[in-house]
């Protein structure tokens, strides 16, 4: 990042990725209102991605949100926490998810503390917010987004570089290590709005990492 133009290009890339990740995090934290769906579609369309065309908010999509993340007996349910998904295993053709408590969550929390990020202050649908763990996907995506926004708004290059460095490390050690697996788990039940949101975030992070 010694070259000025390279540094500013990197800040722009991380900031652009953060706008997308913020919309994806919001989609996981909130019921699928028209605004939530529109925000995700808008960032996708800006990249020429049409996977959210035709997705309509309404009672069926809201029920799917509940089934995906709150009704554990639902065939669509996937616990979107790093501990659960990274520790998942197959048993007689059925995915069994691990506990939501592990050292992964502890380390994520320490990263948040070091950066002054309070995952408990995230807003959204009350049951979703209350159920958050430090390694919930929504928290991890929101944290990356916050780092990217901070880098773009930093007053000096050193602060921006520190945020980008933490963004890269956290994306590599946490989100990037399991988000593709989470997307596959969601898609195995149905290629719905939520499977596509998580796949969209996963592909974006992979593309960003590939440019480094």
Image (tube, rainbow, N blue to C red):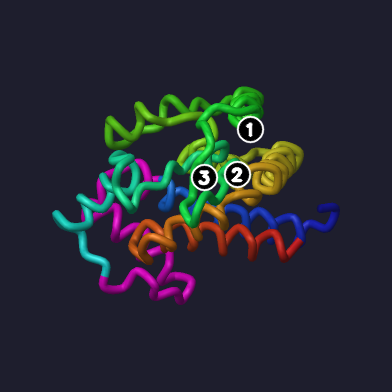
* Mark 3 or 1: the one toward you: 1
Q: Is residue 175 left or right of residue 128?
A: right
Q: Nearer the viewer, residue 148 or 110?
A: 110
Magenta range: 26-54
Residue 207 picture quarter: bottom right
Q: Nearer the viewer, residue 84 or 22?
A: 84
Q: Are marks 1 and 2 in contact (CB under 8 Å)?
A: yes
Q: Identify the residue at image location x=48%, y=71%.
A: 47
Please report the residue visible at 26 percent of the width from the left and 67 percent of the height from the top. Answer: 55
Sequence-earlier tag: 1 or 2: 2
Measure how far apart labels 3 and 1 are at the Cα level.
15 Å
Residue 21 visible, this angle? yes
Above or below for 146 versus 106: below
Mark 1 or mark 2, which is nearer to you?
Answer: 2
Q: Nearer the viewer, residue 149 or 88?
A: 88
Q: Of marks 3 and 2, which one's residue comes earlier in the chain?
A: 2
Furthest-left residue in this view: 59
Secondary structure under tag 2 reads helix
Q: Which residue is mark 1?
A: 104
Q: x, y (%) of residue 209?
A: 70, 59
Disc 3 residue crowd, few under 14, some 14–19, many 20+, Cα 10 Å: many
Residue 119 placed where, x, y %? 48, 29
Specify the quadrant that holds the C terminus: bottom right
How would you rate the neighbour count of disc 1 (Cα within 10 Å): few for under 14, some for 14-19, many for 20 or more?
some
Q: Determine which residue is flagged by label 2.
A: 86
Q: Secondary structure at mark 1?
A: helix
Nearest to the eye among marks 3 and 2: give it: 2
* Crowd around label 2: few <14 · some 14–19 · many ≥20 (10 Å): some
Label whose residue precedes the other's in the sequence (3 or 1): 1
Residue 150 percent coordinates (x, y) = 58, 40
Q: Is residue 5 above or below residue 161?
A: below
């Amino acid at each position: 990042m010694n070259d000025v133009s390279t540094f500013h290009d990197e800040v722009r890339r991380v900031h652009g990725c953060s706008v997308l990740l913020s919309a994806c995090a919001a989609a996981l934290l909130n019921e699928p209102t028209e605004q939530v769906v529109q925000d995700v579609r808008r960032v996708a369309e800006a990249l020429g991605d049409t996977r959210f065309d035709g997705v309509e908010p309404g009672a069926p999509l809201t029920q799917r949100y509940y089934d995906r993340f709150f009704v554990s007996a639902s065939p669509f349910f996937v616990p979107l926490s790093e501990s659960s998904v990274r520790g998942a295993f197959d048993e007689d053709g059925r995915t069994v998810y691990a506990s939501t408590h592990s050292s992964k969550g502890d380390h994520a929390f320490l990263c948040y503390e070091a950066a002054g990020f309070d995952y408990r202050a995230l807003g959204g649908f009350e049951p979703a917010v209350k159920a958050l763990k430090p390694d919930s996907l929504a928290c991890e995506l929101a944290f990356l987004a916050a780092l990217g926004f901070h880098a773009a708004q930093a007053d000096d290059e050193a602060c921006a570089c520190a945020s980008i460095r933490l963004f890269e490390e956290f994306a590599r050690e946490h989100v990037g290590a399991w988000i593709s697996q989470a997307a596959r788990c969601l898609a195995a039940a149905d290629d719905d709005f939520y499977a596509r949101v998580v796949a969209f975030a996963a592909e974006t992070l992979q593309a960003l990492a590939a440019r480094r």
